[in-house]
Amino acid sequence: MKRHVFLLLGFLAFIPILAQQSDYYYYYKGNRIDLEVDSTRLYVVSEGELQSRNSTTSANTRMADYNVKGSTKSYVYNHVVPLQQRRSAVPEVYLSTLDVPEEIDGSDYHNLMEQLETEDNVLQVLPTFSVDGEQVNVTNNFYVKLKSAEDFSLLSNMAGQYNIEIIGHHGFMPLWYVLSCNTSSTLNALDAANLFYSSEKFECCEPEFHGAITFHSNDPLFIYQWNLKYTDEVNSYQGVDINVEEAWEITKGDGAIVAVYDEAIYTGHSDLLDNILVNKGYDINTGSIPVFDALTNSRHGTNSAGVIAAIQDNGIGLTGVAPESNLISIAYGIEVNGNALNKESVNATPLQISEGFAKAYEKGADVINCAWSYPRIDTGMIDSVLNIILDRCVVVFAAGNCKSGSSNKDLLYPADSNPRILTVGGTTNYGTRLTNDMNPGYYSFVESRYGAALDVVAPAMLIYTTDYPYNAASPTYYYSDFAGTSAACAHVSAIAALILSAHPDLTPDQVVSIIEYTARKISPNLYSYQTTSLRPHGTWNEEMGYGIVDAGTAVRIADKASRTTYLRDTVVTYAYINDYDVEIENAVIDKLGLVEIDKEHNVLIRRSFLVEKGGVFRIFESPLPEN
């Protein structure tokens, strides 16, 4: 009896903790992440499409209790390698958001969920969740990362126990598997992901979220490319352009490939078509080459493409920052049954997003331009794919926009998720951060976000670029005010392409370092740039980063960087260097190591540098004699 009393007391002591936690949660890096329920909506996964109460064709009489807000056909898993034993006939799955009547709350809300689950074609019913004010849903799928390839039998056995189907493994990250809860499953995807993780058999388990990819752009008018070359007639502040003409004396981007991860690019534009690698494009929804449709695509991808690679000296239009670089369109896709005209976002899962990055990588992209954000749902799948991609590609993200007067100006996800991502804020033609305060009445609806993860800034208003009119096709249509951090992001992606065109041997991390190191301190009278321990490439400011990007200086410095040997983050046993400059950072010369350097070249020692007892480090006064 005494034992039972102690257990009861322990349970009662735990009740206040439980009361503070959500009934809905998942695990990320070992931590429980609670999800906030949006009780005004429900999210239903069904085999076949649900009908609204206004539909005369609905076979579901209970649908009169609510409205179908939107319904989307589940996308095809193009980057998943299917298991041979999968069901031969896979039904069409629809993801539907339902508005809940205002009078339904509390227990009635959960009763409605249970009622919906009794419908013959319904696979799963869960609440819609709110993450920083953004709507996020959970599909009937979840992801599992094995600890090793040999653990597949553990996955198979556990999936069989709960009648959960293993769809297959990720073609780019083979330890990641996609599992699906169907009509025979005893768990929904959220509970299943948590149960699989709690078994401690797998490295990571997470539900498949379905959230909005949000653009970062706006619209007014201007006719000069002040962002590329300063002119007194247009600007009231010198030094606001990106100094690209100096870079063009060395390179215009030939050989570099930029993936525009965005809405589909209008490939028929005369100022773009020769630079677009059409057959390398990929739509994360359809799994095929992107198709631009004026009724379902926005102008956003075409705007970004023009800033990056509009063709130069062809007698029409304008010029891009890297006018001889090539473009790949990695497209968000067209939502089935969605009215995308002038829409601000499309929905996608982490798996879809990872497919886009993986395809850009596989198609040979040197730079990936990302002018979008995703709800702040921490997900190991996006983390994993970025860790792989960043070893070969420069990944550039827009910092994001917020409404003027907003109290939350923090950077958006995933721009701030990995320090190796190059994150870009926006500036005005007056040399200030893009805010309504600096341009009263002009951009009353947008400000450039900022914070600890901001790296650099670039022009973000009145940017002239390529476009597509919604009323009729035109091969020479232009837009006079591409704005927001999307526009800024495109400038920086193009500069990365210029650098890699001239010096393809540089690593992505070196390219990022060069862009940061060469940024100009713009408007120092307004912004205090200071030395910060986590910012090794010069003084930095939370609103302006290292400053505005400088294409000309970056390309020139890249020439020096390509002639530099980096002894970085490593143990050095032997090095004899007489043709290159040397930069030493976080290096150790071990007790039997030998490093000899010709003094005719520069030697830069940064931060920690250790020569162990017995090691040799020599810098010669003159070149070593030939043997």
Image (cartoon, rainbow, N blue to C red):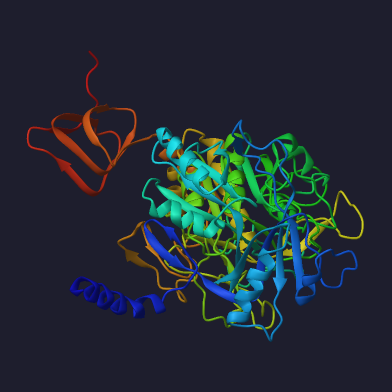
Residue 419 spot, x, y in % from top left: 42, 55
Above or below, 130 against 270 in this view is below
> For the view shown, which residue lies furthest in the front direction?
1
Q: For residue 314, say whether it is visible.
A: yes
Above or below, 328 against 128 in this view is above
Residue drawn at point x = 40 percent, y = 46 percent: 202
Q: Is residue 375 left or right of residue 384?
A: right
Residue 354 spot, x, y in % from top left: 57, 47
Count how many numbered circles sit on residues in the image. 0
Residue drawn at point x = 58 percent, y = 56 percent: 242
When asked about the image quadrant of residue 342, the answer is: bottom right
Residue 270 spot, x, y in % from top left: 83, 45
167 or 622, which lies in front?
167
> For the view shown, which residue lies furthest in the bottom direction?
103
Residue drawn at point x = 89 percent, y = 52 percent: 474
Residue 79 spot, x, y in % from top left: 62, 39
482 or 335, which lies in front?
335
> For the view shown, which residue lies furthest in the left direction?
613
472 or 107, which lies in front?
107
Q: Is residue 261 left or right of residue 270?
A: left
Name the quadrant of the N terminus.
Answer: bottom left
627 or 463, which lies in front?
463
Q: Is residue 462 left or right of residue 470?
A: left
Residue drawn at point x = 56 percent, y = 74 percent: 37
Q: For residue 250, say whether it is visible.
A: no
Name the quadrant of the C terminus.
Answer: top left
